[in-house]
Amino acid sequence: MRAETVREALLPGAGLVLTLAYGSFVAWVYATRPQSFAEVTTMAQVAAGVYRVDDARFASGLELFRRDAFPAARDEWARADPAQRDARTQFYVAYSFYRQGWGRFHHDDALYRQGLAAAERAQQASAEAPWTSDDPNLLIRTPSELKAEIERGLRTELEDFNPLRLMEPRK
């Protein structure tokens, strides 16, 4: 066979492959509706299996968390884990909502609901490989324990009116 014949045979096939790839990309962008190019790159990293959390931003968020600067810590963690797929990061996000919403007399239900959503994300992210915190400053160690604690805080129970509850420590 001549080189021109081979080239002529491959050209329509290559064109079809490129057309299908471009069509798939357009359909993916339409289905995911990214808000920015950064979001597109993050989703592409997730799809390719190369997504990583920014460890420097996570550490910065952890330092803010330990100083009780919870909103600032969550901002850092949002930049560290923009796809919200890392169990450790989402666990700390949920814990920050839990700690900020905790009160001796009542819990902030709005913050607790946001914490519950983050705890569920952490639980989903650690479904295949269970994750446990080794942080000595935390009394709650797993996403499922944290989720249960937040759910308990969202319920109104007779025990909520017990005056001894005022002695209960924040976890």
Image (spheres, rainbow, N blue to C red):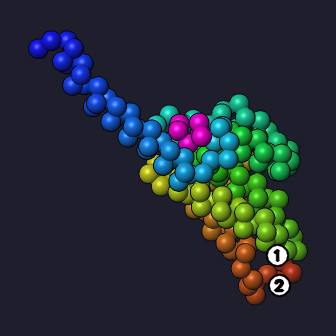
Tell me the quarter of the image containing the C terminus.
Answer: bottom right
Q: Is residue 150 above or below residue 14?
A: below
**Position of residue 85 in the picture relative to residue 170 (left or right):** left
Q: Is residue 64 above or below residue 168?
A: above
Please name the residue that numbered disc 1 is placed on: 165
SS majority, magenta: helix
Q: Position of residue 119 (x, y in %)?
A: 63, 59
Q: Position of residue 29 (x, y in %)?
A: 54, 46
Whether 137 is among the magenta residues is no
Q: Is residue 167 above or below residue 39?
A: below
Q: Nearer the viewer, residue 70 or 39?
A: 39
**Would you call the spot at circle 2 few (<14 residues within 10 Å), some (14-19), or many (20 or more)?**
few
Residue 161 bears which disc, if any?
A: 2
Q: Looking at the image, can residue 135 be seen?
A: no
- Residue found 24% across the figure and 18% down from its top: 7
Q: Are marks 2 and 1 in contact (CB under 8 Å)?
A: yes
Q: Is residue 84 above or below residue 118?
A: above
- Residue found 44% across the figure and 51% down from its top: 128
Tell me the quarter of the image containing the N terminus.
Answer: top left
Q: Nearer the viewer, residue 146 or 90?
A: 90
Mark 1 residue type: Arg
Q: Secondary structure at mark 1?
A: helix
Q: Range of the magenta residues?
A: 40-45
Q: CA distance from mark 2 to mark 1?
A: 8 Å
Q: Position of residue 136 (x, y in %)?
A: 69, 45
**Would you call the spot at circle 1 few (<14 residues within 10 Å), some (14-19), or many (20 or more)?**
few
Mark 2 residue type: Phe
Q: Secondary structure at mark 2?
A: helix
- Residue found 83% across the figure and 84% down from its top: 161
Examine the image and state in which quarter residue 62 appears. Answer: top right
Residue 40 bears which disc, if any?
A: none
